[in-house]
Amino acid sequence: MKNLVLLLLLGYPAVAQTRVDPARVDRLLQRAAVIDLHDDTTQMILDEAYNLGEKHDYGQVDIPRMRSGHVSGVFLSIWTDSDRYTPVEAIRRTLEQIDAVRREIARHPGDLEMAATSAEILAARKRGHIAILMGVEGGIAIDSDLAVLRSYAELGVRYLTLTHTNHTPWADSSSLAGTHNGLTGFGREVVREMNRLGMMVDISHVSDKTFLDALEASAAPVIASHSSCRALASAPRNMTDDMLRAIAKKGGVVHINYYEGFLDDGFAGRETALKAEQAEQNAIDGRTPNFGDRSQNGPAVRKINAQRIAKLGHLPLSRLLDHFEHAVKVAGVDHVGLGSDFDGADDLFPEGMEDISKTPNLVRGLMERGFSDEDILKILGGNTLRVMREVEQVSLRLKAENR
């Protein structure tokens, strides 16, 4: 009764559900290649000596919970705060994070395996390992230098999010009024070089005009690594229906973000109204060094997150399922995937999807919505593997043409 009252208060329509046999969920997950395109756990690995081998009572991602979630691969985000770091400093911070990821993989050879291609993900899965991949979040990290981009590719980075919350000198972000009218000429060069390198072009965080320019410039399908549906929640980070259709036409994939602020405008408004918590978090960020000991930052922010959750509660899992269902209806089932944003969204995830171990709940929910097993397999990772293969094929063709 309590959950029903909550649904009515939040204005969500009741969804007819079919009882799902737990054995069906388990059978499907045994077959699936579950691939999450965006997890921010890297910051904790670098700054807090976070051990992926231990099951933690905080955060959302570690090996035990990945095993419980039947995860085959995760893209760890290599993110640098463009408000705190200059572009040159961002390169150093990016390299530190890449090094931290590679060392953590080496620390757990029985469970983790570095991967950079679709084939390597499947090979790791066959060996019983979890594939770890990397995506650089924010074009600030290349400092407008294609040589830096090429170096990241050599180190195993397989996507670049063109912007984060600030513009780069060559691309507009979704968070600010545009200054470049999308991509500049150099921005198009970045996209073309990513095509050649076999790096996926990630349009999460970019302005609508940058999105259109990136689709036009790219010879390969593009992805949104962690974006939800703007028709259901108006955050500019989310994809409009026209954007969903455009990504599908290009052959790309939109990976749905689980962060509650991107799932529901009412929740986002209530979160924004918590001024004291945000001011406290800003103060912590302000006194934390860019380099050196940042270990106290995470625990302090998680304490604030707990205060937020105590005031806000959680959205029901049905609201996340709404975004998956809407994206499938608009873009088609071949163009939707997983982009949780775990460890990067203040612990604000729907009830039943609190961490990466909860993937069976998502599968069960999709089954209850009437999705077939084959369609769910596509959403869990099949679509991502397909787009990676297509990006790899474009790269081979472009390299052959340039010989």
Image: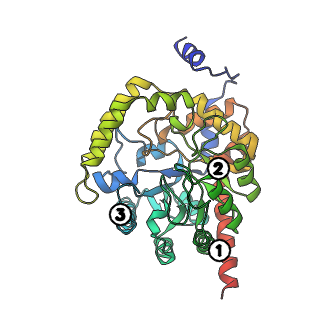
Report whether 46 appears left or right of 217: left
Q: Which mark is residue 254?
A: 2
Q: Earlier in the sequence, mark 3 or mark 1?
A: 3
* Element carrying mark 1: helix
For label 3, the residue is 93
Q: Furthest-bottom residue in view?
A: 403
Q: Mark 3–mark 1 contact, CB under 8 Å?
A: no
Picture quarter with the C terminus = bottom right
The residue at the point 54 percent across, 54 percent down is 173
Q: Confirm whether residue 251 shows in the render.
A: yes
**Who comes first in sequence, dot 3 or dot 2?**
3
Above or below residue 381? Residue 232 is: above
Mark 3–mark 2 distance (CA, rounded to whole Å)? 28 Å
The one nearer the camera, 252 or 271, is 271
Residue 351 in sight here = no
Measure the C-alpha gap from mark 3 to mark 1: 28 Å
The percent coordinates of residue 224 (x first, y second) are 61, 53
Mark 2 belongs to which amino acid?
Val
Task: Give the side of residue 13 with respect to residue 102, left or right.
Answer: right
Q: Is residue 400 above or below residue 130?
A: below
**What residue lies at 27% left-to-right and 60% top-to-bottom?**
291
Q: Residue at x 37, y 58 (%)?
A: 108
Instruction: Name the mark nearer the viewer: 3 or 1.
Output: 3
286 lies above or below 223: above
Q: Amino acid at mark 3?
A: Arg
Residue type of the residue flagged with mark 1: Ser
Q: Which mark is residue 247?
A: none
Residues at circles 3 and 2 in contact by the CB criterion of under 8 Å: no
Q: Secondary structure at mark 3?
A: helix
Element under disc 2: strand
Locate residue 370 relative to residue 175 in the image: left or right: right
Q: Which numbered disc, 2 or 1, marks the residue that appears first in the sequence? A: 2
